[in-house]
Amino acid sequence: MQPPSGSSRPTLEMVAARAGVSRATASRVLRGSSKVSGSAREAVLLAADEMAYTVNRAARALVTRRSDSIAFLVAENEDRMFRDPYFLGVLRGAQAEAAAAGMQLVFVIASSAVDVEHFTTFVGGGHVDGVLLVSLHGDDHLARRLETLGVPTVLNGRPFTPDTGIFSVDSDNVGGGRRATDVLVARGARSIGTITGPLDMAVGQDRLSGYQQALVAAGLPYRSSAVVEGDFTVEGGAEAMARLLEAQPDLDGVFVASDLMALGAIRTLTERGRRVPADVAVVGFDDVREAQLTTPPLTTLRQPLDELGRSMTRVLLARIGGDEVPQRTVLPTELVRRGTA
């Protein structure tokens, strides 16, 4: 419905009066806050629709000092970003949740220290209301710096340094690594290796920890020679698998900390004459689309990529709106049994 011809633009006060709520309640509904009853939310949204009310973003920005935009920063190079389905899955969920809340999503790739400095300057200028940080390597300096600038930040994955007060949304990487290794143990594998993710990332450390816990629970020895660090790429997985076979010639099972690396690992095993899973069973992590295209199809741990992006965005928007949310959110993983283990 359009406003009557010649009438003035509907205001927030007019929407609140029509809905029978206070101006503050109408404001909370229209900026996506969760601190509103269902009946009040429905009344305000109906009134806004009937009056064709739209937020005057420029005017509101002058009053609230908000941009109605959030940033999605991937701390990787462009090649990695666009080749790894993980990032696109999380981005898709974040974009959908931001759009539903009427927010703009600013997508940024920062592959160097210069990129990070430019981004920090941009954020410090008030161009976004909050930041979603994805694939952070090393310590949590960037997240802490953004928070110091007064910009709410949510990290994908647990903070690298515990108890830093950083908000995060993560998959159960420890539990997933443990379950993946349990699958190999259950099928009778006894010389079980792992190709980890980058160990300067919490996700790499956590999946390794799950692997270690599963070995201990099964009464199997943990051997450092059976642990090879990878880089979450197909090529890195292939190279790591070659090194693992040299160190552990009797290898009969391997947990690979990402599906892309598992694709490379299977390629190397095939080239070396090792049958999968008859000679070496393989379990991956992520459940990207390509996991179904291997021969045989890859057994893996599924991460809820879309929900990771959505949950990160919900936490960030709640923080921007002044709502209380848990500092850490952990989403479950799911075992997907296929043909490699």
Image (tube, grey):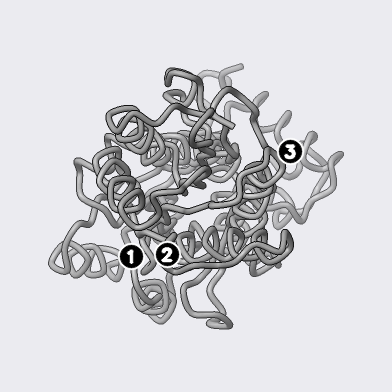
Secondary structure at badge 3 equals helix
Asked if the residue under mark 3 is in contact with the one under mark 1, i.e. CB atoms within 8 Å, the reply is no
* Above or below: residue 64 compared with residue 162: above
Compared with 245, 210 (above or below) is below
Q: Which residue is mark 1?
A: 126
Q: Amino acid at mark 2?
A: Arg
**Closest to the observer: 277 or 288?**
277
Name the image quarter holding the N terminus: top right
Work out whether residue 167 can be spotted: yes
206 to 317, vertically: above or below: below
Q: Which residue type does callout 1 highlight? A: Gly
Give the class, few, some or many, for how many residues have Cα within 10 Å of label 1's Cα (few <14, many ≥20): some
Label annotation for residue 44 = 3
Q: Sequence-wise, which precedes: disc 1 or disc 3?
A: 3
Horizontal side of residue 228 vs 257, given as left or right: left
Return the x and y of residue 218 as percentages of the image width and height.
Answer: 72, 59
